[in-house]
């Protein structure tokens, strides 16, 4: 006995423009289960090639036929699928095999047809398709647009001053290298008193004389002499020298011990206090934010989340995974992406590569679902990805006038190191290293150190002031071990000395 069944049903959304984002190979009932973006990209490219060249006339029929299990009512042993269509359509992929569906296996129907009448079929909704396709390109294009607009506005409204030797000397050479690193990298640790004295001695601003070296029974006796005018000291140096020397030009460990007898005195604390007095204004300036960009970033993120939640409540997206995927990876990338500091403005490549990375991430997330997102969900993902781009540029610290001066001085120094005879001083080598110019300095030394060729006078914009630059930092004096400890005074030192004398 042969039984024939006529099943009538209506499909909604099964016909879409051929340029729409196609579904993957897996069953459509698998929903938005993620797949490899590279595999999905290959599937999308193959499907788009079928839409060419008449993309406004080609449409795709794509749907599943899912059967009940064999144990329900005897099941269906075999079913042959036949597709018929009216005269308004012309089948383009006649050689594609429709296949045979068996129990418990879904039957995938994919066909590309050409629509003959003018206009668009009433059953085809182009807006969701447009949103889905826009999800691929919009985050990248909008991110690049926002990035370029940000860089243009930042350079226009906050132009950098002209860098020259005078600016470098006043803005960089007057600061301890540790503070320069703090302003550029956000990290700050003051030099030790030991390093401070050796740096001053190397620059011939003081002399250090060890009168008697340290022994097991006594600390070393050391004499310090100021060998330069105090007016020529940097503010940091003058602050520390004033605390250690007072009004005198010579001081010894014996003087220090006598002056602070009965009290605690730690010269490292003196250096730290002077450093903090310089660092505090810089830290306060570095805390400038970008409230307008931050508000725009939060608005985009809220709108994107709202659209995707709406698609969940409307049942056009059953799985919340695309919402989490749109939030978490982008936030991680925005948080980890380097944005420089207020005194080191990010370059064009840094911003644009960041925008491209976030745009490609958004495209990968849009490609990942086996079944393309609905129009509202796709729009929400686009808005979320664009919000991440805004979040990245909102994190870029805002530069103040002092920061712009430091940045201009850094760029001037880097430009000088590209010349055969840079207008720099060896006393600034530590400052150049703190500015991040150590690689440029190493390249300059590799090219020009030991070279006796006459310099190219056409390359010299100004005559170097002072001795020729060698790229070698001044060497500190070599001193016996333990020479620094006599400058510290502990509250109990006197009692220990008196006890020792009584015991003797």
Image (cartoon, rainbow, N blue to C red):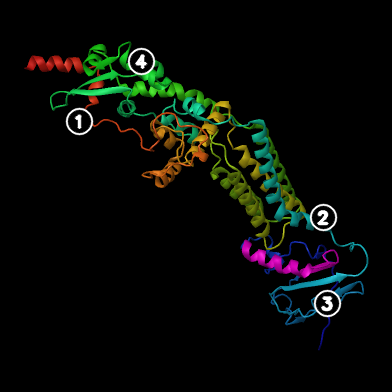
Q: Secondary structure at mark 2?
A: helix
Q: Which residue is mark 4?
A: 242
Query: Viewer-nearest of labels 2 and 1?
Result: 1
Q: Tell me which label, 3 or 1, sits earlier in the chain.
A: 3
Query: Viewer-nearest of labels 3 and 1?
Result: 1
Q: Tell me which label, 4 or 2, sits earlier in the chain.
A: 2
Q: Gap in Å between the C-alphas at discs 4 and 2?
A: 74 Å
Left or right: 295, with 349 as reference point: right
* Quadrant of the rendering where the N terminus is positioned: bottom right
Q: Secondary structure at mark 3?
A: loop
Q: Nearer the viewer, residue 272 or 401?
A: 401
Q: Tell me which label, 4 or 3, sits earlier in the chain.
A: 3
Q: Secondary structure at mark 1?
A: loop
Per the rendered image, the range of residues in magenta is 37-63
Q: Which residue is mark 2?
A: 127
Q: Tell me which label, 2 or 1, sits earlier in the chain.
A: 2
Q: Gap in Å between the C-alphas at discs 2 and 1?
A: 81 Å
The quadrant in which residue 399 appears is top right
Is residue 116 visible in the rendered structure shown here?
yes
Label 3 Cα neighbours within 10 Å, binned few <14 / some 14-19 / many ≥20: few
- Residue 83 marker: 3
Query: Viewer-nearest of labels 2 and 3?
Result: 2
Q: Which residue is mark 1?
A: 480
* Quadrant of the rendering where the C terminus is positioned: top left
Q: Nearer the viewer, residue 420 or 33?
A: 420
- Residue 210 marker: none
Q: Are marks 4 and 3 in contact (CB under 8 Å)?
A: no
- Residue at position x 30%, y 12% from top? 248
Label 1 Cα neighbours within 10 Å, binned few <14 / some 14-19 / many ≥20: few
Q: Gap in Å between the C-alphas at discs 3 and 1?
A: 96 Å
Q: Secondary structure at mark 4?
A: helix
């Amino acid at each position: 006995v042969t039984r024939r069944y006529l099943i009538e049903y209506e499909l909604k959304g099964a016909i879409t423009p051929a340029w729409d984002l196609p579904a993957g190979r897996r069953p459509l009932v698998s929903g938005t289960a993620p797949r490899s973006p590279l595999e999905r990209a290959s599937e999308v490219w193959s499907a788009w090639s079928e839409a060419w060249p008449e993309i406004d006339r080609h449409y795709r029929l794509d749907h599943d036929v899912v059967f009940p299990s064999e144990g329900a009512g005897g099941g269906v042993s075999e079913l042959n699928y036949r597709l018929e269509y009216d005269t308004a359509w012309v089948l383009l992929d006649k050689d594609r095999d429709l296949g045979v569906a068996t129990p418990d296996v879904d039957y995938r129907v994919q066909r590309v047809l050409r629509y003959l009448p003018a206009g668009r079929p009433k059953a085809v909704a182009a807006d969701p398709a447009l949103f889905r396709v826009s999800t691929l390109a919009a985050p990248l294009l909008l991110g690049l647009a926002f990035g370029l607009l940000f860089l243009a506005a930042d350079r226009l409204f906050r132009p950098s001053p002209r860098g020259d030797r005078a600016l470098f000397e006043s803005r960089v050479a007057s600061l301890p290298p540790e503070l320069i690193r703090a302003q550029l990298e956000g990290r700050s640790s003051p030099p030790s008193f030991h390093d401070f004295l050796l740096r001053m001695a190397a620059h011939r601003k003081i002399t250090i004389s060890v009168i008697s070296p340290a022994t097991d029974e006594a600390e070393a006796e050391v004499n310090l002499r100021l060998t330069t005018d105090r007016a020529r000291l940097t503010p940091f140096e003058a602050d520390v020298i004033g605390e250690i020397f007072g009004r005198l030009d010579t001081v010894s460990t014996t003087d220090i011990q006598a002056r602070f007898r009965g009290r605690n005195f730690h010269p490292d604390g003196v250096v730290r206090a002077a450093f903090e007095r310089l660092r505090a204004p810089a830290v306060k300036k570095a805390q400038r934010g970008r409230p307008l960009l931050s508000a725009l970033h939060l608005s985009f993120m809220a709108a994107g989340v709202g659209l995707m939640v709406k698609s969940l409540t409307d049942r056009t997206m059953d799985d919340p995974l695309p919402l989490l995927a749109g939030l978490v990876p982008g936030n991680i990338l925005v948080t980890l992406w380097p944005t420089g500091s207020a005194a080191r403005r990010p370059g064009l490549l840094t911003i644009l590569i960041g925008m491209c990375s976030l745009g490609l991430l958004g495209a990968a997330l849009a490609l990942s679902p086996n079944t393309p997102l609905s129009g509202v969900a796709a729009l929400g993902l686009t808005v979320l990805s664009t919000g991440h781009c805004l979040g990245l540029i909102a994190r870029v610290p805002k530069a103040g006038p002092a920061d712009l001066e430091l940045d201009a001085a850094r760029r001037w120094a880097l430009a000088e190191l590209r010349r055969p005879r840079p207008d720099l001083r060896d006393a600034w080598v530590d400052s150049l290293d703190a500015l991040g110019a150590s690689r440029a300095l190493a390249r300059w030394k590799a090219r020009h150190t030991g070279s006796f060729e006459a310099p190219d006078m056409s390359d010299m914009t100004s005559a170097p002031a002072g001795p020729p630059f060698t790229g070698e930092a001044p060497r500190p004096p070599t001193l016996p071990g333990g020479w620094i400890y006599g400058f510290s005074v502990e509250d109990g030192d006197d009692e220990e000395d008196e006890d020792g004398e009584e015991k003797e």
